[in-house]
Amino acid sequence: MGRPRRADEAGGIYHALNRGNARGTIFHKPEDFEAFERILAEGLERYACRILAYQLMPSHWHLVLQPTEEGGMSNFLRWVSLTHTMRSHAHYRTGGEGHIYQGRFKSFPVQDDEHFLVVCRYVERNALRAGLVKRAEDWRWGSLNRWLDDPERLPHLLSPWPIPRAPRWVERVNTPLTAAELKAVRTSVNRGSPFGGETWVQRISQQLNLQSTIRPRGRPKKES
């Protein structure tokens, strides 16, 4: 079976993520996180894509992106991943010792309403959920910590959101997602299926040819 089609439409919103090979560590020290943020900034200058939210974890990263032209997300992340791999191998002198990433990045479309806010909460509380910090905003290598800086520290990475943040946003991020919200986001991560309201999901799946991502898995039941 071939790879599912990659949704990457201008103006769309996408949650993208990638993990280290065999879930290994890709950021070993603070300087590694900082170097990756500089790579993101370079990529934003080269490719038609915006970062709305992000979180860098020791073994993986999450990005909420909005390409501004067709294919902008894929072009941006292809360059970011390749550049990060090359520079990391050069820094640690590990050229020829294997892959850094498990494979190509995963992504799924997100509706620009409350579902977008759920995804951003999921991304921005990742380090808190993993027990790396006591408060979500304490994790330096993420958009919540960066957003609270006024003005945003260099390099500039964040673009304005398509909808307003909910009131008391920091407290909302520090509040766990419901079991249903967490399950829904993880299903979209695993399947690449659109994350949104039922009507929107049906429409966008047809528009982007993603119907296979929302069909039940397994063989269809036989009629008696």
Image: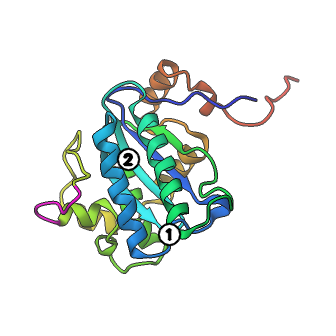
Q: Where is residue 79 in the image (x, y as percent from the top left)?
A: 45, 42
Query: Considering the image in quadrants, where does the N terminus appear?
Result: top right
Who's the residue at 52% across and 62% down the image? 90
The residue positioned 39% from the left and 75% from the top of the image is: 30
Inspect this view and state whether residue 21 appears: yes
In this view of the protein, which residue sits in the foreground, 158 or 122?
158
The colour scheme used to paint the residues is: rainbow
Near-viewer residue (73 or 110): 73
The answer to which image quadrant residue 38 occupies is: bottom left
Label 1 with label 2: CB-CB less than 8 Å? no
Confirm whether the magenta stretch covers residue 150: yes
Spot occupied by residue 92 in the image (x, y as percentages of width and height): 54, 69
Residue at left 40%, top 50%?
Answer: 63
Q: Circle 2 — which element?
A: strand
Count of numbered badges drawn on the protein: 2
Disc ID at residue 64 = 2
Disc 1 secondary structure class: loop
Q: What stretch is highlighted in magenta?
A: 149-155
Outermost residue toward the top? 207
Above or below 147: residue 104? above
Residue 58, which numbered label? 1
